[in-house]
Image (spheres, rainbow, N blue to C red):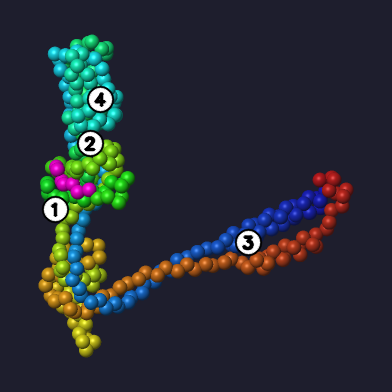
Amino acid sequence: MKKKNKMLWSICVCILILVGIIYAYLSNETTTQASATSKTTTTKEVEVSKQTITNHLTSSGEVISNVTETLELNTYRYFKEIYVEENDFVEEGANILKYTNGTYLVAPYNCVITKLSIPEEAGDRCTSVHNIEIQSTNELAINISIEEEDIAKVKVGQEVSITINAYEDKTYTGMVKKINQIGTYASNGSSFSAVVTFANDGEVKIGMSGSCEITLEKAENVISIPIEAVQTKENEKYVVVKDEDGSTKNVIITTGISNDAYVEVTSGLTGNEIIEMTLQTTNQTNQKGMGMPMGEMPEGFEKINKERSNMPQMTQGQRGGM
């Protein structure tokens, strides 16, 4: 019995060792990937040119009516019939409600009915609590948000280019109607709301979405260079100018407005120079490392197999007695 138990114990130990080696082998088979990053520096020659530099502010919002009005019913008359329901569009001059004396309440302009408060039955007298709320579809507006670093550049009356998402091939011209003087604080900077108004051509519906673009700064036909060409040393800006003989020199410049790509040069360059700019490109390569090649026996694996082959084999009777 002791010999039998010893043999069983040896088999269990061998199986555990084998499972551990197989697990390590399979884990090592997974591909590990490392990133190697390198930077490449190149020098590019650019000819100084003249162009128009424009800075824009873009903000989106919902189209709303710029005019909301409550039409009060005539308290000296009696209600007879209503021709509209809430959310109906009504053209200017169309009948909204009829009184028993044959007169009508008509739409003062193109509008949408937003709320009805009328007598319950025909023949009831109209009172001061009866009215009809409408919103104009002629004069529309969009509420936009302006970041605090741009608020000083936006003025009431400033022209706005508007694109309605449903009609991207059209551009509407509006203006800044109102700027809220109290901002909304956020950890990344405060913002101010503003109202942009524009005239409807009959296509835009209340509730549509639109994008507003305001020109904050514009410099036409000015000397311009790529932003990457500007270097700074001791609080002075300069560019590297290449002479005809191939030599280079640093030229101090003064800059004006800029956008994402170009900056205006107000002094230091005449517009016919060749400048050098240094560009850095970050290259990222993936290095793949494979584990043990398939088919190669892990260390210790062959030894376990030999040990197992040298073990005494159990007979059918021994298996049955386990």
Looking at this rendering, what residue extends furthest in the bottom direction?
A: 245
Q: Are marks 2 and 3 in contact (CB under 8 Å)?
A: no
Earlier residue among tags 3 and 4: 3
Residue 47 occupies quadrant: bottom left
Q: Nearer the viewer, mark 2 or mark 3?
A: 2
- Closer to the observer: label 2 or label 1? 2
* Residue in the picture at 19% in, 68% down: 51
Nearest to N terminus: mark 2 or mark 1: 2
Apparent side of residue 167 relative to residue 77 in the rendered image (left or right): right
Query: Which is more toward the observer, 107 or 40?
Result: 107
Q: Which residue is mark 3?
A: 25
Query: In the drawing, what numbered circle is on residue 115?
Result: 4
Label 2 to label 3: alpha-carbon separation = 73 Å
Residue that numbered label 1 is attached to? 153
| Front position among marks 4 and 2 | 2
Could you say where residue 313 lies in the image, as x and y percent from the top left? Answer: 84, 56
Residue marked by disc 2: 137
Q: Residue placed farthest to the front in the image?
A: 102
Q: For mark 4, does the 10 Å Cα neighbourhood hold few (<14), some (14 to 19), or many (20 or more) residues?
A: some
Residue 258, disc = none
Q: Earlier in the sequence, mark 3 or mark 1?
A: 3
